[in-house]
Image (tube, rainbow, N blue to C red):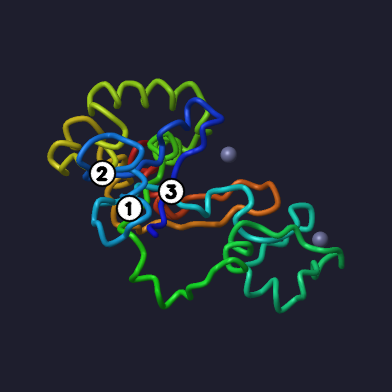
Amino acid sequence: MNLISNSDAHSLPNLGREANIMEIEEISYSEIKEAIQNKKSGKLIKTIEFHPEEGIYHYDGHRKCGVCLAPEETKKKNCICPQCGKPLTLGVAYRIDELSDRNKKDIHSLSEYVSIVPLQELIAEVLAVNKLSKKVQTIYEDLINKGKSEFNILLNLSTEELKKIVDPFMLEAILRMRSGKIYLHPGYDGQYGVVKIFSDQERINQQQKLI
Ligand SMILES: [Zn+2]
Ligand SMILES: [Zn+2]
Protein backbone atom coordinates (compact mmCIF):
# COMPACT_ATOMS: atom_id res chain seq x y z
CA MET A 1 0.00 0.00 0.00
CA ASN A 2 1.29 3.45 -0.91
CA LEU A 3 0.99 6.32 1.53
CA ILE A 4 -0.37 9.41 -0.16
CA SER A 5 -1.51 12.91 0.72
CA ASN A 6 -4.73 14.54 -0.37
CA SER A 7 -6.01 18.04 0.19
CA ASP A 8 -9.14 18.85 2.14
CA ALA A 9 -12.31 19.32 0.16
CA HIS A 10 -13.96 21.65 2.65
CA SER A 11 -12.39 24.97 1.73
CA LEU A 12 -12.31 26.17 -1.85
CA PRO A 13 -8.90 27.90 -1.92
CA ASN A 14 -7.28 24.73 -0.53
CA LEU A 15 -8.81 22.40 -3.06
CA GLY A 16 -6.09 20.62 -5.00
CA ARG A 17 -3.20 22.03 -3.01
CA GLU A 18 -1.98 18.48 -2.54
CA ALA A 19 -1.96 16.06 -5.43
CA ASN A 20 -0.81 12.68 -6.69
CA ILE A 21 0.96 11.94 -9.93
CA MET A 22 0.05 8.58 -11.42
CA GLU A 23 0.86 6.79 -14.62
CA ILE A 24 -2.24 4.80 -15.41
CA GLU A 25 -3.82 3.17 -18.45
CA GLU A 26 -7.03 5.17 -18.16
CA ILE A 27 -8.71 7.41 -15.62
CA SER A 28 -10.86 4.84 -13.91
CA TYR A 29 -11.63 3.73 -10.37
CA SER A 30 -9.86 0.41 -10.75
CA GLU A 31 -6.69 1.96 -12.18
CA ILE A 32 -6.50 4.58 -9.42
CA LYS A 33 -7.19 1.92 -6.79
CA GLU A 34 -4.43 -0.24 -8.25
CA ALA A 35 -1.97 2.66 -8.27
CA ILE A 36 -2.59 3.40 -4.59
CA GLN A 37 -3.00 -0.15 -3.32
CA ASN A 38 -0.37 -2.02 -5.27
CA LYS A 39 3.00 -0.48 -4.60
CA LYS A 40 4.72 -2.90 -6.96
CA SER A 41 2.64 -1.71 -9.91
CA GLY A 42 4.79 1.45 -9.94
CA LYS A 43 1.79 3.42 -11.10
CA LEU A 44 1.97 5.97 -8.33
CA ILE A 45 4.84 8.22 -9.30
CA LYS A 46 4.77 10.86 -6.63
CA THR A 47 2.64 12.57 -4.05
CA ILE A 48 2.83 16.34 -3.65
CA GLU A 49 2.08 17.50 -0.15
CA PHE A 50 2.56 20.50 2.03
CA HIS A 51 4.36 20.11 5.32
CA PRO A 52 2.10 18.33 7.79
CA GLU A 53 3.67 20.42 10.57
CA GLU A 54 1.59 23.34 9.32
CA GLY A 55 -1.61 21.71 10.53
CA ILE A 56 -3.25 23.06 13.67
CA TYR A 57 -3.05 19.78 15.57
CA HIS A 58 0.28 18.28 14.54
CA TYR A 59 2.12 18.18 17.86
CA ASP A 60 0.71 17.85 21.36
CA GLY A 61 0.31 20.65 23.84
CA HIS A 62 -1.68 23.39 25.49
CA ARG A 63 -2.05 26.63 23.62
CA LYS A 64 -2.90 28.67 26.73
CA CYS A 65 0.08 27.25 28.63
CA GLY A 66 2.42 27.81 25.68
CA VAL A 67 3.38 24.14 25.85
CA CYS A 68 4.16 22.34 22.59
CA LEU A 69 5.60 18.82 22.68
CA ALA A 70 6.68 16.14 20.23
CA PRO A 71 5.00 12.74 20.85
CA GLU A 72 8.13 11.23 22.42
CA GLU A 73 8.23 14.01 25.02
CA THR A 74 4.50 13.78 25.64
CA LYS A 75 4.88 10.11 26.48
CA LYS A 76 7.70 10.86 28.92
CA LYS A 77 5.34 13.26 30.66
CA ASN A 78 2.49 10.72 30.65
CA CYS A 79 0.40 13.07 28.49
CA ILE A 80 0.16 15.60 31.32
CA CYS A 81 0.89 19.30 30.82
CA PRO A 82 3.99 20.31 32.82
CA GLN A 83 2.49 23.78 33.22
CA CYS A 84 -1.06 23.19 34.48
CA GLY A 85 -1.14 19.49 35.29
CA LYS A 86 -4.12 18.72 33.05
CA PRO A 87 -4.13 16.20 30.18
CA LEU A 88 -2.49 17.52 27.00
CA THR A 89 -4.35 17.90 23.73
CA LEU A 90 -2.83 15.16 21.62
CA GLY A 91 -2.10 15.85 17.97
CA VAL A 92 -1.96 14.03 14.67
CA ALA A 93 1.69 12.98 15.01
CA TYR A 94 0.90 11.27 18.31
CA ARG A 95 -1.95 9.33 16.74
CA ILE A 96 0.20 8.36 13.76
CA ASP A 97 2.78 7.04 16.19
CA GLU A 98 0.12 4.96 17.93
CA LEU A 99 -1.26 3.50 14.71
CA SER A 100 2.06 3.04 12.98
CA ASP A 101 3.28 -0.46 12.17
CA ARG A 102 6.54 0.78 10.67
CA ASN A 103 9.31 2.64 12.41
CA LYS A 104 11.19 5.66 11.16
CA LYS A 105 14.01 3.49 9.85
CA ASP A 106 11.59 2.14 7.26
CA ILE A 107 11.25 5.60 5.80
CA HIS A 108 13.02 4.51 2.61
CA SER A 109 10.02 2.31 1.87
CA LEU A 110 7.74 5.33 1.64
CA SER A 111 6.37 6.46 -1.68
CA GLU A 112 8.14 9.28 -3.47
CA TYR A 113 6.93 12.59 -2.17
CA VAL A 114 7.74 16.23 -2.49
CA SER A 115 6.93 18.77 0.21
CA ILE A 116 5.87 22.25 -0.78
CA VAL A 117 4.91 25.49 0.92
CA PRO A 118 1.81 27.11 -0.58
CA LEU A 119 2.70 30.05 -2.83
CA GLN A 120 0.56 32.49 -0.85
CA GLU A 121 2.57 31.67 2.26
CA LEU A 122 5.83 32.28 0.41
CA ILE A 123 4.60 35.65 -0.80
CA ALA A 124 3.41 36.52 2.71
CA GLU A 125 6.79 35.52 4.11
CA VAL A 126 8.66 37.64 1.59
CA LEU A 127 6.46 40.68 2.19
CA ALA A 128 6.21 40.03 5.94
CA VAL A 129 2.44 40.42 5.85
CA ASN A 130 -0.52 38.16 6.58
CA LYS A 131 -1.16 35.51 3.93
CA LEU A 132 -4.82 36.53 3.77
CA SER A 133 -4.00 40.15 2.93
CA LYS A 134 -5.13 41.75 -0.30
CA LYS A 135 -1.55 42.48 -1.31
CA VAL A 136 -0.67 38.78 -1.18
CA GLN A 137 -3.77 37.90 -3.17
CA THR A 138 -2.97 40.42 -5.91
CA ILE A 139 0.61 39.21 -6.32
CA TYR A 140 -0.53 35.59 -6.16
CA GLU A 141 -2.97 36.04 -9.03
CA ASP A 142 -0.41 37.94 -11.07
CA LEU A 143 2.16 35.16 -10.56
CA ILE A 144 -0.32 32.43 -11.44
CA ASN A 145 -1.06 34.24 -14.71
CA LYS A 146 2.63 34.52 -15.53
CA GLY A 147 3.68 31.10 -14.29
CA LYS A 148 0.70 29.06 -15.56
CA SER A 149 -0.08 27.31 -12.27
CA GLU A 150 0.97 27.15 -8.62
CA PHE A 151 2.57 23.72 -8.96
CA ASN A 152 4.42 24.88 -12.06
CA ILE A 153 5.91 27.81 -10.15
CA LEU A 154 6.68 25.86 -7.01
CA LEU A 155 8.08 22.75 -8.67
CA ASN A 156 8.84 23.03 -12.36
CA LEU A 157 10.07 26.41 -13.54
CA SER A 158 13.85 26.73 -13.84
CA THR A 159 15.75 29.43 -11.99
CA GLU A 160 16.10 31.33 -15.27
CA GLU A 161 12.37 31.16 -15.93
CA LEU A 162 11.57 32.21 -12.37
CA LYS A 163 13.88 35.22 -12.64
CA LYS A 164 11.61 36.62 -15.34
CA ILE A 165 8.56 36.67 -13.08
CA VAL A 166 9.77 37.18 -9.50
CA ASP A 167 12.24 39.43 -7.66
CA PRO A 168 15.47 37.99 -6.16
CA PHE A 169 14.07 37.67 -2.61
CA MET A 170 11.06 35.73 -3.85
CA LEU A 171 13.31 33.61 -6.06
CA GLU A 172 15.43 32.75 -3.02
CA ALA A 173 12.27 31.80 -1.11
CA ILE A 174 11.16 29.40 -3.85
CA LEU A 175 14.60 27.81 -4.19
CA ARG A 176 14.92 27.30 -0.43
CA MET A 177 11.46 25.82 -0.30
CA ARG A 178 12.50 23.37 -3.04
CA SER A 179 15.64 22.34 -1.19
CA GLY A 180 13.79 22.04 2.12
CA LYS A 181 15.97 24.67 3.82
CA ILE A 182 13.17 26.10 5.91
CA TYR A 183 12.25 26.39 9.57
CA LEU A 184 9.17 24.52 10.73
CA HIS A 185 7.43 25.13 14.02
CA PRO A 186 4.67 22.50 14.25
CA GLY A 187 1.10 23.47 15.04
CA TYR A 188 -0.52 22.24 18.28
CA ASP A 189 -3.78 22.54 20.22
CA GLY A 190 -5.54 24.65 17.59
CA GLN A 191 -2.50 26.81 16.87
CA TYR A 192 -1.34 26.85 13.23
CA GLY A 193 2.15 25.63 12.55
CA VAL A 194 4.59 28.22 11.27
CA VAL A 195 6.81 27.90 8.23
CA LYS A 196 9.69 30.33 8.07
CA ILE A 197 11.98 30.66 5.09
CA PHE A 198 14.16 33.51 6.31
CA SER A 199 15.72 34.12 9.68
CA ASP A 200 15.03 37.42 11.44
CA GLN A 201 18.55 38.56 10.61
CA GLU A 202 18.10 37.84 6.91
CA ARG A 203 14.88 39.81 6.96
CA ILE A 204 16.60 42.81 8.57
CA ASN A 205 19.38 42.63 5.96
CA GLN A 206 16.80 42.52 3.21
CA GLN A 207 14.88 45.51 4.59
CA GLN A 208 18.09 47.52 4.81
CA LYS A 209 18.75 46.82 1.17
CA LEU A 210 15.34 48.23 0.27
CA ILE A 211 15.87 51.51 2.15
ZN1 LIG B 1 -9.30 20.28 7.12
ZN1 LIG C 1 -1.50 23.18 30.33
* Label 2 Cα crowd, 10 Å radius (few <14 / some 14-19 / many 20+): some
Q: Quadrant of residue 166?
A: top left
Q: Which mark is in front, 3 or 2?
A: 3
- Three-letter amino acid code at disc 1? Val
Per the model, the C-alpha gap separating discs 3 and 2 is 17 Å
Image position, residue 111 (x, y; %):
33, 60
Q: Which mark is in front, 1 or 2?
A: 1
The one of 173 and 61 positioned closer to us in this rendering: 61
Q: Which mark is in front, 1 or 3?
A: 3
* Label 3 Cα crowd, 10 Å radius (few <14 / some 14-19 / many 20+): some
Residue wearing tag 1: 114
- Kind of element beneath mark 2: helix
Badge 1 vs badge 2, beta-carbon distance below 8 Å: yes
Residue at the farthest right position: 85
If you read the primary sequence from the N terminus, does the residue marked by circle 3 or circle 2 appear first?
3
Badge 3 vs badge 2, beta-carbon distance below 8 Å: no
The image shows residue 154, relative to residue 185, as above or below, that is above
Q: Which mark is residue 5?
A: 3
Residue at coordinates 49% horizontally, 57% vertically from top-left? 184
- Three-letter amino acid code at disc 3? Ser
Quadrant holding the C terminus: top left
Image position, residue 164 (x, y; %):
16, 31
| 168 with respect to 48 (left or right) | left
The image shows residue 8, relative to residue 136, as above or below, that is below
If you read the primary sequence from the N terminus, does the residue marked by circle 1 or circle 3 appear first?
3
